[in-house]
Amino acid sequence: MALSVKIISEEKIRPSSPTPDTQKHLKFSFLDQLALPVYVPVLLFYAPGGDDNQTSKSHRLKASLSKALAQYYPFAGRVQDNNVSIHCNDEGAIYVEAQVNCRLSDVLNQLNVDSLNQFLPFSIASSDSAKGCILLVQTTSFQCGGMTIGLLMSHKITDASSISSFINTWTAIAVAGDGSNATISQLPLPEFIRDSVLQPPQDFQVATPTSDTGIHAKGVTKRLVLKGSKITALKAKAASARVEQPTRVEAVAGLIWKCAIAASKSTSGVSKASVLGQAVNLRKRLEPNLSDTSIGNLLGFITPETKAGAAEIELQEVVGLLREGIAEFKKSGYKKYQDTEAYLEFFKTMTDPDGPYSSDKNFYLCSSWSRFGFYETDFGWGCPIWFIGGLSMFSNFFLLMDTRDGRGIEALVTLSEEDMAVFQRDEDLLAFASFNPDVIQVADSKGSSRVCEGKSTSEVAVGSDVQVLSV
């Protein structure tokens, strides 16, 4: 039976208290202005359970969302002025309720990544009524009583840390119920990064790369999972004198990048230079430091590069390049993000015909959502049994996420159809990763009992000195 999601209702959830006139206009920071005008998806799957029925859950979600929007008031506004500011007019987040004609297990045990967009309000987001909308939510009820909560967050004002902070506030209010006002008073307030913090140069206009790199082209997305035991073995293989103890993200990103390079060489017959754009959290690098609840695109980039004409590239080599990029960033690379003129020069190199987007190079983008605590997203009826984000935002894109037990990594990899056909047969990759295993099998792996018992989202999100971050 074909999957069929039916929209039951659509409404706007407005903040529980009006936004003051002094806060009605939020001009984007320099980095927010550079962000692509796309939505970042977040999708949470919940098993049947809890004392609430679907009607009670719906009421709890909407009431707590309204209170959360009073704190995150720009999320209830609309983007305006050619994508450079938000009118904080309390127009509201769009909230959609839907039903699907199957059980939760039917989706999770026969997972089709391409079908997951039905659980997100993309069709609403593209309508005129949602023009400029910052946040859209869709809840979908399964026949078994399970549900999904899907969010679309505008990339113009959010990165993964921003999304995590918002969801953390929303869930805290939802769990508190009648005592939510006391809870709200104890929550850290979001700090919206304005143009006064990261000021654009005068007469600045955003330029979009136009060279034929494939980064914006349509591709094929595959899901793969590396269990904790496999990552331990992978880290041992990736270790070298240059990097004695690779991190999980370094090892997994390095493996995927290495195998993507090999696939491109196999299909094209040419060994091009390859660049991996890896986003890094700026919050604890800018001077002065910004709080963990700073909201905006606070992303720096490292761009390690392999040379053209190289023979087969080894895992240790690419992991070494990633580590060197992070070391340089920690030393001084972050400084250009506060010197907007210097950053503008850096941005120009990114769009230069001879820069990373050059047609003579393969450009890949890797984003890590590891350690952001999405599996701790409890609205009052338990934590999600599965979480996924990103969902094919670009081609040549790798998104890394935690498995539910916190030990493994789940990845979404989007490549051209030709490259993917080779990539998914790579023996070096298959030695450590499984393609599209049943979600329940991954969720029930050893160690899952630790979910919801660890750090808060904000503590998990910025737990390392230089954290690899989402775009």
Image: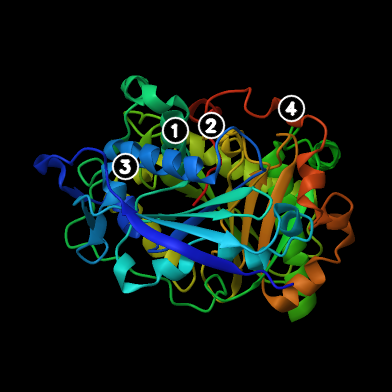
Which of the marked residues, 2 or 4, is nearer the chain's N terminus? 2
Q: Residues within 10 Å of mark 2 (few under 14, many from 20)?
A: some
- Give above or below for 44 relative to 274: above
Residue 394 visible in image: no
Could you say which disc has been placed on residue 449 in the image? 4
Q: Could you say whether the residue bearing mark 4 is in a helix, strand or loop?
A: helix
Q: Which of 10 and 163 is in front in this view?
A: 10
Q: Mark 2 points at which residue?
A: 380
- Give above or below for 73 relative to 406: below
Q: Mark 1 points at which residue?
A: 174
Q: How much space separates mark 1 and mark 4, taking CA atoms?
A: 22 Å
Which of the marked residues, 3 or 1, is nearer the chain's N terminus? 1
- The N terminus lies in which quarter of the figure? bottom right
**Residue at left offset 38%, top offset 21%:** 179
Q: Which of 433 and 23 is in front in this view?
A: 23
Q: How much space separates mark 3 and mark 2, taking CA atoms?
A: 41 Å
